[in-house]
Image (cartoon, coloured by chain):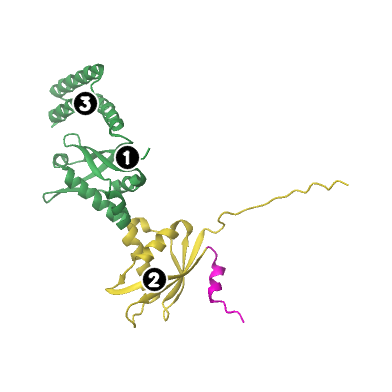
Amino acid sequence: MVRFKHRYLLCEVVSDDPRCRLSLEDRVLGGLIRDTIARVHGTFGAASCSIGFAVRYLNAYTGVVLLRCRKEFYHLVCSALPFITYLENKGHRYPCFLNTLHVGGTIRTCQKFLIHYNRRQLLILLQSCTDEGERQAIQKSVTRSCLLEERSDEEFSESGEEEAAEAME
Amino acid sequence: MPTPATTYERIVYKNPSEYHYMKVCLEFQDRGVGLNAAQFKQLLISALKDLFGEDAALPLDVLTYEEKTLSAILRICSSGLVKLWSSLTLLGSYKGKKCAFRVIQVSPFLLALSGNSRELVLD
């Protein structure tokens, strides 16, 4: 069949500074990635990657980003991601790095992976949390996500993760 | 009498040479512009870096360079030939002065650059 094939890169923004994730914006991040590709791969890389490039999904609470690029040039984007060392927003510069979690051919496969990944992260958070109030909030999120799994919900089950992230701060 | 069976072996090399050699000549629009060998190599590296970024760290060698005619013989590994040739094609200027690279000969063998059948004169 004749269609444009894409690769979807699921990445996580990891930073020491808690304000870094809250200042995430799709346009700022898209511009930053385009500049990095131009620096690492030159004019050729910038031109070939920018045709099908888009930031498809962004979650400021968990720092998860879904990038889309053409299948023929996704290796250029993938290899340029480790060169991102800071995030600049409104004059403030936050050091961070992008961790690639999953590369998928469609948004649906990345969504399935993200749901599975978030459930595992909730369990890890449950093991490592210290405060009793946090523990109860996370346990509530875990039971809710199990109920959602039984109902085989198709939406991103991010609300539990967001509440846990808020309770941690 | 039956002929004895002979073992026949044929070895074919797809591309025996890992390097490609290019004979190039730099032409400026104005006369009287000179470059020494280091500046010439710097120009080549900057042309590669312009088009391909940090990814253009190819092991490029300038084997010979003549300052009078601004011609040189370059050596590049075969996988980087396309990148080098395309960046030479798209190089437009050096320090604000317009220039162009003319590629005279390309060969995987250095010996082939010593003679050019196009310049052969038959008596």
The residue that appears at 26% across and 52% down in the rendered structure is: A36
Q: Quadrant of the N terminus of chain A?
A: top left
Disc 3, SS = loop
Question: Between B8 and A79, which is closer to the camera in this rendering?
Answer: B8
Q: Which residue is mark 2?
A: B101
- Residue A15 relative to residue B12: left or right: left
> Does the image show residue B14?
yes
Q: CA distance from mark 2 to mark 1?
A: 38 Å
Does label 1 lie on the same chain as label 2?
no
Q: Please tell me whether residue B118 belongs to the stretch shown in magenta.
A: yes
Q: CA distance from mark 2 to mark 3?
A: 57 Å
Q: Please tell me whether residue B29 belongs to the stretch shown in magenta.
A: no
Which chain is displayed in green in the rendered image? A
Alpha-carbon neighbours of circle 3 within 10 Å: few (<14), some, or many (≥20)? few
**Residue A20 appears at what percent x and percent y?**
16, 42
Amino acid type indicated by mark 2: Phe
Alpha-carbon neighbours of circle 2 within 10 Å: few (<14), some, or many (≥20)? some
Amino acid type indicated by mark 3: Glu
Quadrant for residue B14, please give it. bottom right
Q: Which residue is mark 3?
A: A155
Q: Which mark is residue B72?
A: none
What segment is highlighted magenta in the picture?
B108-123
Amino acid type indicated by mark 1: Arg
> Chain for mark 3?
A
Asked whether the residues under the numbered discs 2 and 3 touch, taking CB atoms below 8 Å apart as contact, a structural biologist would say no
Q: Which residue is mark 1?
A: A7
Which chain is displayed in yellow in the rendered image? B
**Residue A123 appears at what percent x and percent y?**
25, 24
Q: CA distance from mark 1 to mark 3?
A: 21 Å
Quadrant for residue A126, please give it. top left
The residue that appears at 36% across and 62% down in the rendered structure is: B48
